[in-house]
Image (cartoon, rainbow, N blue to C red):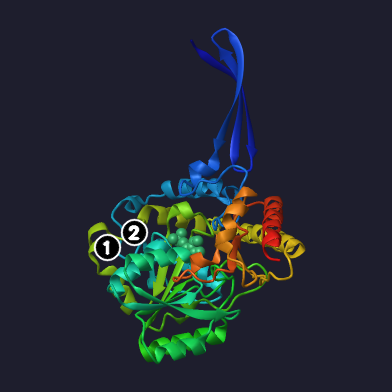
């Protein structure tokens, strides 16, 4: 039996690629439809039922991943006389990449950024793990904001750290409470997400940033600043990043290309003082393997130099603003008055506060029956409290899906919050 193909029609719908194929199976005319689920191919770390709108997904939607721009950057990079990019990399990472990154960030941050203060990572997750490995021992205490990025908690658990959560308000970490806690104990470091925080969307005020740095010097602890959303500001300019304070040898500012270019690149950076840099580069891992990710960083260097990164970032900012507005206005129209949230100026998230009596985790089975999902507040706390909160992301879905998702969610909440 043989098969010959006469005709293929490609239809792209949401996250699926549908191929309508017409051909001859032996002597018979034959047609069939093949559905390739791009979502499953691209994001193998989760599996979503086809009709579910999963508002817990905190990553760029697949239609926002810049394949063509990266093809252009790779073509540009690989046509240069630069075979060094295939050699073991320098300990801190490729200087030419750091130079391009410093130029890009200087413009974005409106600050002068020194290329010698970068250490290349394979993303913030790896950077965090590396910092825990180098600066802590099991049983050491660290401070975090409560709530915090749920998956960072897993990294701290891997290193068997004693994690102390400190409260936040709309201006970020409450510094007075930090000072009270410092009177009892000093952490090795404080992990903070200062701008467009995950999950709350809140931003640490400039005055609190200054005070935090001052306290880190006074009490001698490190500040591990996860600045992954710093560049994703949609309506204004957030306070200067914690990277501004790296002249203090207590600050490590972590950045990433995951949310501004593509998470699959696994590329990020730590920006820090030369004293801390020495600690990062004199490790067995770096001595044996050389700097991290030299090849990908060279391609991203081309993406920056060709202006593709900047173009992608301004495209993302427009799309995310529209998506945020679509989600938040649908929430405002459909949620009961007993549910509140703050509209964030950037980042990926909307954090809902439900009535005290509602446990978001217990709503999940009913939400799934109605083809919607979210991340319950308990995921973002080391003690799994914050039960009457939940986090929604507007980064992944198109506006119409976000609206539909908000309506489905609101009907579940309405039924359970009277
Ligand atoms: C606050 C925060 N930090 C880090 C990450 C992961 O960053 P990376 O992909 O660079 O490891 C995320 C992703 O959701 C995040 O929200």
The residue beneath circle 1 is: 286
Badge number at residue 328 = none
Does ligand 1 reach within 8 Å of label 2's beta carbon?
no
Q: Nearer the viewer, residue 9 or 304?
A: 9
Circles 1 and 2, Cβ within 8 Å, touching? The answer is: yes
Q: How many labels does the image show?
A: 2
Q: Distance between the residues labelled 1 and 2?
A: 8 Å
Position above or below: 172 against 211: above
Answer left or right for 235 relative to 301.
Answer: right
Question: Mark 1: which secondary structure?
Answer: helix
Which quadrant of the structure image shows residue 153?
bottom left
Whichever of labels 1 and 2 marks the residue nearer the N terminus, that label is 1
Residue in the picture at 53% in, 85% down: 208
Answer left or right for 279 relative to 246.
Answer: left
Furthest-right residue in view? Answer: 333
Image position, residue 230 (x, y; %): 54, 70
Position above or below: 408 against 4: below
Question: Mark 2: which secondary structure?
Answer: loop
Image position, residue 90 (x, y; %): 30, 62
Q: Which of 78 and 254 is in front in this view?
A: 254
Q: Residues within 10 Å of mark 2 (few under 14, many from 20)?
A: many
Q: In which quarter of the image is the C terminus?
A: bottom right
Badge number at residue 292 = 2
Image position, residue 351 (x, y; %): 61, 68
Q: Is residue 156 visible?
A: yes
Which quadrant of the structure image shows residue 58?
bottom right
Q: Residues within 10 Å of mark 1 (few under 14, many from 20)?
A: some
Image position, residue 298 (x, y; %): 41, 55
Q: Is residue 54 visible?
A: no
């Amino acid at each position: 039996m043989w098969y010959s193909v006469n005709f293929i029609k490609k239809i792209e719908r949401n996250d699926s690629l549908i191929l309508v194929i017409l051909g001859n199976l032996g002597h018979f005319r034959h047609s069939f439809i093949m559905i390739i689920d791009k979502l499953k191919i691209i994001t193998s770390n989760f599996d979503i039922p086809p009709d579910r709108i999963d508002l817990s997904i905190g990553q760029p939607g697949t239609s926002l991943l810049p394949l063509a721009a990266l093809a252009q950057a790779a073509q540009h990079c690989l046509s240069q006389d630069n075979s060094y990019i295939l050699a073991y990399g320098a300990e801190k990472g490729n200087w030419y990449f750091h130079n391009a990154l410093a130029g890009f960030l200087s413009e974005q941050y409106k600050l002068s950024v020194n290329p010698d203060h970068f250490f290349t990572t394979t993303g913030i997750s790896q950077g965090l793990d590396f910092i825990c490995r180098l600066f802590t021992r099991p049983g050491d205490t660290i401070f975090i904001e409560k709530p915090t990025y749920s998956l960072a908690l897993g990294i701290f658990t891997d290193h068997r750290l004693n994690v102390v959560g400190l409260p936040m308000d709309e201006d970020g970490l409450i510094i007075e409470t930090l000072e009270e806690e410092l009177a009892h104990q000093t952490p090795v470091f404080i992990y903070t997400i200062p701008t467009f925080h995950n999950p709350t969307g809140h931003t640490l005020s400039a005055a609190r940033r200054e005070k935090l740095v001052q306290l880190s010097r006074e009490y001698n602890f490190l500040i591990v600043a996860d600045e992954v959303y710093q560049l994703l500001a949609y309506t204004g300019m957030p306070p200067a990043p914690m990277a501004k304070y790296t002249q203090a040898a207590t600050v490590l500012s972590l950045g990433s290309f995951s949310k501004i270019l593509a998470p699959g690149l696994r590329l990020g950076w730590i920006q820090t003082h030369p004293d801390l840099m020495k600690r990062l580069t004199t490790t067995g891992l770096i001595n044996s393997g050389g700097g991290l990710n030299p090849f990908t960083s060279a391609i991203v260097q081309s993406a920056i130099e060709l202006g593709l990164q900047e173009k992608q970032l301004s495209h993302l900012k427009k799309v995310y603003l529209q998506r945020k507005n679509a989600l938040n206005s649908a929430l405002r129209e459909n949620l009961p008055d007993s549910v509140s949230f703050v509209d964030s100026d950037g980042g990926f998230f909307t954090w809902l506060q439900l009535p005290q009596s509602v446990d978001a985790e217990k709503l999940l089975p009913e939400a799934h029956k109605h083809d919607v999902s979210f991340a319950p507040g308990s995921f973002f706390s080391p003690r799994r409290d914050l039960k009457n909160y939940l986090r929604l992301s507007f980064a992944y879905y198109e506006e119409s899906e976000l609206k539909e998702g908000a309506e489905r969610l609101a009907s579940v909440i309405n039924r359970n919050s009277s």
